[in-house]
Image (cartoon, grey):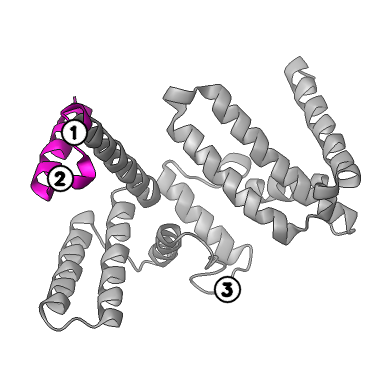
Amino acid sequence: MDVSRERIIEELGLLYDLTWRLRRECPWDRKQTPESIVAYTLEETYELSDAIHHREERGDEAVCGELGDLLFQVYFLAVVAEESGLYDLGQVAAAIREKLVRRHPHVFGEGSADTPEQVRENWEVIKREAEGRQGIFHEVPVTFPATLFAQKLQQRAAAVGFDWEEAVDVLTKVREELGELEQELAREPERRRVEEEVGDLFFAVVNLARKLRVDPELALRRSALRFKERVEAAATAAGEDGHVFAEMGLAEQEAYYQRAKKEQEK
């Protein structure tokens, strides 16, 4: 056995022992349930995503630390289940290993897939046929963030052939949805209708991102971060010129914002 593999197995075992000790001896850990701990699991997932996004500034050690935090969440939830006699960490590992083997016949069997797109198509077929998933939208959690929920629904529809041919076709749909929103706003706007039209526009944009192979959640997050950085830079520049950004007119604020944007794009 490879020395590094031995070390990894040893460390995973030590973490398992530590998790059980915390569950037995720490009042806070002892009190937790799967329902109470899952909120922290989601939080750690977002923190890992943030560390990966800022990897150049924070370094790989930050990513490693966040991976550890998320790994502990998996261990803790599995220990709580084992405590209740449901399943243990070994069964969790065995289940995901078996699933990955089943869903990768091009690696472990006689299937074939030469592109990432073919792998995804095969994946969906296996889930529907080999795993008995029922319906087109089988088991898409409604608790997903909205962009991910929309993306998953669109992927499932595409898997059965209900999809646009090209990204340009979706761009036409985006313009159509924008036009419908403009029409709604041109008359006495009804809040429910405006909300529906905005939602349709968002859904079409997510679909466009999918066809362009862009993750809509990451793209929106990065745009939001760029906006944040530009506004902060604009406010700082205004302050250096003796102005209070919040007290300036929109045209003056926009001028500083555009200046910050140019600096950021250099």
Q: Which residue is mark 2?
A: 248
Compared across the picture, whether 94 is left or right of 194 comes to right
Can you identify the residue that label 3 sits on? Answer: 134
Figure quadrant of the N terminus: top right
Q: Give me the residue at 32% from left, 45% from top.
A: 224
Picture disc at residue 140: none
Residue shown at 66% from the left, 51% from the top: 99
> Is 108 covered by the magenta stretch?
no
- SS state under label 3: loop
Identify the residue at image location x=64%, y=50%.
40
Name the residue beneath numbered marker 1.
238
Q: Report x, y in % for residue 111.
A: 55, 47
**Quadrant that contains the C terminus:** top left
Q: In this view, which residue lies farthest toward the top?
A: 3
Residues under labels 3 and 1: Cα distance? Answer: 58 Å
x and y percentages locating residue 117 in the rendered image: 41, 48
The residue segment tinted magenta is 238-266
